[in-house]
Amino acid sequence: MDKFEVMVTRRLPAGGMELLGESCRPRLWDEDRPAPEEWMRKNAAGADGIVCLLSDRIDEAMMEAAGPGLKVISVMAAGYDGIDVEAATQRGVLVGNTPGVLSEATADLTWALILAVARRIVDGDRMMRAGTFTGWSPTLLVGADFAGRRLGIVGMGRIGREVARRGIGFGMEVVYHNRHRLAPEVEKSIPTHLVPLNELIASSDFIALHCPLNKESYHLLGANELASMKPTAYLINIARGPVVDEDALVAALRDRRIAGAALDVYEHEPNLTPGLAELDNVVLAPHLGSAAVATRHRMAQMTVENLLAGMRGGVPPWCVNPEAKQA
Ligand code: DGY
């Protein structure tokens, strides 16, 4: 039997390449940096499937370069904002992603970032390495309390709900904003309740962003929203960079209009918005949300399962546009 032709924009971990190699001929970008667009365009030509990362742009032109044989695009991520899903659907190309499996790891990292910025872990680490710690002091690197404070979650999908549960564990009150209200029994089980976005922004001590990036969420937090936050509040973005207007965030942090921020994603990822790196009230992580061993293994497997199902004429088990099958 002929093998499927597949463009793969990064080597998959956890035996993913071996699994793929059983029935596919991978055209692999085997460097640990993003595949150049030129390379992708060339290697997409005539492919049955594409395996890509969240940072790859798979737009209509790339699908056009692949040609009419392209059946499936499988992204190793929960977020699929790098793919023009509308164009894919119109062309009958299925898009698979890896939801659910990374919710706990991403929620854990959200909490790592909250704790790092609000309890000044990074400042403390720098101090220890510089040898400037001279002994316990009542005023040394004093950060925020959590118990009794309000955690506001924007985007209450699977990750948001896991972050909420952890917040309850820290003794916090948890409110959320979402396109749809959660089922009453889910709200009760956390517990949490829906509030309007402006109320969440103005009243929360910690704001954690977990919404997908789309037209509605682009710059959801801009200068006005940042100005309405409490001066003692912290912003955590582990969703997608462009959800926050980072120029406005740099200004708010520099002028101490908010207490701090922690970011795992960036508006111009992988580049930093000018001014961000100079600030001492922000913690910066290199998009580590799902970076835990078992999580990444499962993501790699799901990516291959989605790819194979789509190329064999089925619908990927985790598919964002099953309607493409009928297109
Ligand atoms: C995703 O899968 O969308 C996450 O951003 C990966 O960490």
Image (tube, rainbow, N blue to C red):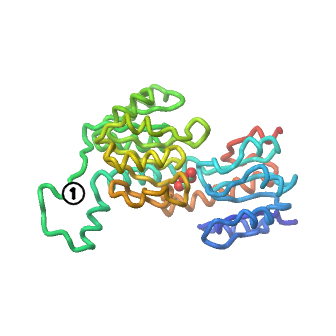
Q: How many marks?
A: 1
Q: Is residue 16 among what the camera can see?
A: no
Relative vertical location of residue 153 with respect to residue 29 in this rendering, above or below: above
Q: Quadrant of the C terminus?
A: top right
Between residues 276 and 236, which one lies in front from this camera angle? 276
Q: Position of residue 224 (x, y in %)?
A: 43, 35
Relative vertical location of residue 118 with respect to residue 158 in this rendering, above or below: below
Name the residue tied to disc 1: 141
Q: Is residue 146 among what the camera can see?
A: yes
When asked about the image quadrant of residue 7, the answer is bottom right
Q: Residues within 10 Å of mark 1 (few under 14, many from 20)?
A: few
Q: Residue at x 42, y 50 (%)?
A: 250
Relative vertical location of residue 283 with respect to residue 100 in this rendering, above or below: below
Between residues 278 and 130, which one lies in front from this camera angle? 278
* 5 to the left or right of 97: right
Q: Quadrant of the N terminus?
A: bottom right
Relative vertical location of residue 265 with respect to residue 218 in this rendering, above or below: below
* 103 to the left or right of 128: right
Between residues 240 and 71, which one lies in front from this camera angle? 240
Instruction: Identify the element where label 1 is drawn.
Output: loop
When asked about the image quadrant of residue 132, the answer is bottom left
